[in-house]
């Protein structure tokens, strides 16, 4: 697998482009090509996504996402935006938690994925990308993104959009799979996700595209920027209380809070003293 470092990549502090992973030249050669390929894969494989996801996670996907939302502290009456909602697994769970007095909006660029989310009972579906959200400032109390951060073009642009659409005091939850720190752990997970899952997918007649998407899925994980870079990009975008918790060493849960005006004012006062 050839991974070509992007020529524009830089640290979050400089405000220059910060893609979540380098160009993966086995699949595409430039950003335009990546957009077309990723969009096509997710559209074409949307009907198989839940099945493959169930296989990959040994059927624990809904339980894990429910627990993650519980740890996040989502409560009835809140307004949540689920970015990169896919088939709407997180959005459907969130709808049940926030109840009739709350609001859940599922956003995704893939019409195939949004159709699956509709079938699952997700009520508010919006086509769009995380980098350019079609919502007014401070529209949501909470924002979630499950396993989609590796598909955005730029972490800085995305996190500034997240900050903008959250209320002051609002919070975000990013779920991601992170490459294990040990070489042995990485090799084992690679064998499972890049070889076994795609093979099983093909044997069980869920198509070449789904198998190719699963290989790509692993490659984006293996070449993803380290957790420290994601945490730093969240801080650079203006978030506070930026944290990462892990489950089983590979399931990362990033949380962060948009500062309230009071906190900003307090900081200004302290700086002036
Ligand atoms: C692996 S699926 C994750 C679905 C779901 N969130 C879950 O928990 O299973 C990734 C989703 O991200 C979407 N996606 C790709 N590029 C995106 C972007 N720039 N902004 C938001 N979502 C994007 C894809 O269409 C796909 O539905």
Image (cartoon, rainbow, N blue to C red):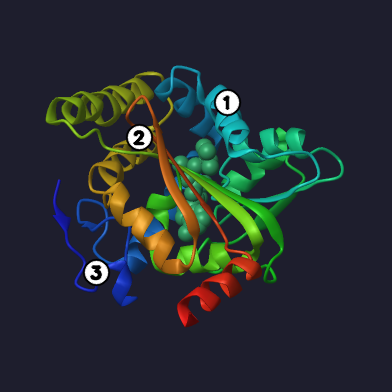
* Dot 3: element: loop
Percent across and percent down for residue 83 are 57, 52
Front-most of 240 and 29?
Answer: 240
Mark toward the start of the polypeptide (1 vs 3): 3
- Report whether 207 appears left or right of 44: left
Task: Tell me whether the residue at label 1 lies in contact with that at label 3, contact meaning CB atoms closer than 8 angstroms.
Answer: no
Q: Residue furthest front?
A: 273
Q: Residues within 10 Å of mark 2 (few under 14, many from 20)?
A: some
Q: Alpha-carbon distance for marks 1 and 3?
A: 35 Å
Q: In which quarter of the image is the N terminus?
A: top left
Q: Residues within 10 Å of mark 1 (few under 14, many from 20)?
A: some
Q: Residue at x 32, y 68 (%)?
A: 12
Percent across and percent down for residue 96 are 76, 33
Q: Which residue is drawn at 59% across and 69% down?
A: 164
Say which mark, if any, is on residue 62. Answer: 1
Residue denoted by label 2? 208
Say which mark, if any, is on residue 9. Answer: 3
- Report whether 41 appears left or right of 15: right
Kindly indicate the quadrant of the structure image that contains residue 113.
top right
Q: In this view, does 61 lie above or below 95?
A: above
Q: Alpha-carbon distance for marks 1 and 2?
A: 25 Å
- Report whether 77 appears left or right of 174: right
Say which mark, if any, is on residue 43. Answer: none
Mark toward the start of the polypeptide (1 vs 2): 1
């Amino acid at each position: 697998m050839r991974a070509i470092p992007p020529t524009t990549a830089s640290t979050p502090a400089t405000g220059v482009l910060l893609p979540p992973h380098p160009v993966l030249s086995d699949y595409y050669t430039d950003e335009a090509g990546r957009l077309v390929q990723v969009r096509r894969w997710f559209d074409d494989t949307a009907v198989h996504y839940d099945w493959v996801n169930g296989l990959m996670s040994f059927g624990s996907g809904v339980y894990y996402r429910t627990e993650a939302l519980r740890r996040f502290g989502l409560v009835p009456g809140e307004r949540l935006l689920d970015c990169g909602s896919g088939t709407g697994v997180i959005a459907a769970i969130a709808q049940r938690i926030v109840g009739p007095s709350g609001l859940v909006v599922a956003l995704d660029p893939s019409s195939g994925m949004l159709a699956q989310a509709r079938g699952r009972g997700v009520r508010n579906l919006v086509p769009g990308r995380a980098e350019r959200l079609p919502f007014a400032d401070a529209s949501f109390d909470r924002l979630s993104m499950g396993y989609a951060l590796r598909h955005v073009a730029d972490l800085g642009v995305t996190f500034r959009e997240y900050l903008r659409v959250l209320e002051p005091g609002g919070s975000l939850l990013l779920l991601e799979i992170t490459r294990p720190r040990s070489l042995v752990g990485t090799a084992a997970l690679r064998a499972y996700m890049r070889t076994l899952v795609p093979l099983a997918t093909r044997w069980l007649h869920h198509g070449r595209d789904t198998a190719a998407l699963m290989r790509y899925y692993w490659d984006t994980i293996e070449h993803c920027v380290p957790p420290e870079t994601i945490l730093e990009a969240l801080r650079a975008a203006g978030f506070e209380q930026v944290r990462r918790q892990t489950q089983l060493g590979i399931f990362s849960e990033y949380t962060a809070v948009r500062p309230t005006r009071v906190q900003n004012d307090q900081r200004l006062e302290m700086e002036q003293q």
